[in-house]
Amino acid sequence: MPTISLVLAGVSFEIETQSLRLIDLFTDYYRYYPPRVVEDREQKPSRDRYDAVSMRLTLECVDELPQLPDHLPPASTLLSRTGVLELWESRGGEAELAEYYFGCEVASFHVNPARGTIKGLVAPSAFRFPHILANTYSLFPVLLILRSLGLYHLHGAAVVSPRGKVWLIPGSQRSGKTTIATALGLAGWKPISDDSLLLRGHPGGTGSGPLEILALRKYFHLGNELLDRWPHLQGIERRHSYLDRTCVAALEFFSQPKLDGASIPGVDFLLMPRISGEAESRLSQASPSTGLLMLGQQSVFLQMWREHTSRQWGGLALIVQGARCFSLESGVDLLEDPLLVASMLEGVESSA
């Protein structure tokens, strides 16, 4: 079976599927890691090149997707329902041996964290918006495996200023993270990620180590309005379009394509954006407790596995302890002048 092999945040990751469309999709999605496609298991790289931990995603295309509740083990429990995505848990006695099932209208996934395996079924309708399959539906089970290995997801952007200061920008979907990261890139800043980071480390736990923040590197998902409105983006490489967004090669555009595996330096500033719709943007200082609450909302989606949840909150608290927190009400003026946000944040750095 054709297999994509790569290393994601120090974890050996293999994606197996007979579908050449899925091979092309996921090779492109994980292009920064970089992936290698092999045709059979004998050609796969030796496990000696990896850390001891690994995960495998096996994908099968089916003509019709079974209804998830119909093929769950007895006594499975619904843990969450977010939009079209459901997460179920099935315990086999010990909590650490629990298995999980993600389901949506176009795909379903069976996750075994103890074995590091994910088995997915993909319906033909998933190919209507294939990048959503890679960036959303299949990413949730991958993040669950990473969580079991002590790598915690944070929904946020990260940008380095010309002064070398790191700005972390957590926020909900459509809060303006990608817009701000792109605008700062146009002003000469260095965007590292537009919406996904990984936290690694065990603050406060056994075997404590320093907190690391890693970018989960992928295409930026820019609104088509920005591509039409900002002429400075005309030369950016456009890869995939879906709904009202386009996937663009922003890391190459801003000369940041070779940050794979490198930890982000300590966070200096935390910026919490919200689109206000008002004429003028407003920047105001926020309390550390507000910053911690925002980080929690954008990181601890499922408080699963008590020890991991404790370590995750400990890492988020470390970020807030070392950073100054600000709220940004993004107005129409930012859309009209992408350089405006840089001047606002540079004023903060100058006064620090």
Image: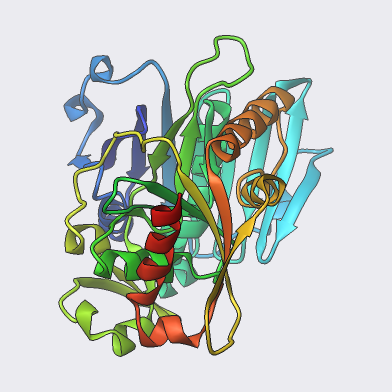
- For the N terminus, the image quarter is top left
Q: How many marks?
A: 0
Q: Is residue 37 above or below residue 132?
A: above
Q: How is the image coloured?
A: rainbow
In front here: 274 or 47? 274
In front here: 116 or 242? 242
Q: What residue is shown at x 46% (from left), y 61% (from top)?
A: 133
Q: Is residue 301 visible?
A: no
- Left/right of residue 172 with respect to residue 251 in the rendered view: right
- Coordinates of residue 273 in the picture (x, y in percent): 55, 66
Q: What residue is shown at x 70% (from left), y 43% (from top)?
A: 302
- Left/right of residue 334 with respect to residue 41 in the rendered view: right
- Coordinates of residue 216 in the picture (x, y in percent): 39, 46
Q: Is residue 202 above or below residue 61?
A: above
Which quarter of the picture shows residue 95?
Answer: top right
Q: What residue is shown at x 48% (from left), y 49% (from top)?
A: 269
The furthest residue to the right: 75
In front here: 4 or 72? 4
- Coordinates of residue 192 in the picture (x, y in percent): 32, 51
The furthest residue to the front: 351
Q: What residue is shown at x 23% (from left), y 78% (from top)?
A: 233
- Coordinates of residue 297 in the picture (x, y in percent): 67, 51
- Left/right of residue 216 with respect to residue 78 in the rendered view: left
Which quarter of the picture shows residue 50?
Answer: top left
The furthest residue to the top: 207
Q: Is residue 192 above or below residue 126?
A: above
Q: Is residue 268 visible?
A: yes
Which quarter of the picture shows residue 310?
Answer: top right
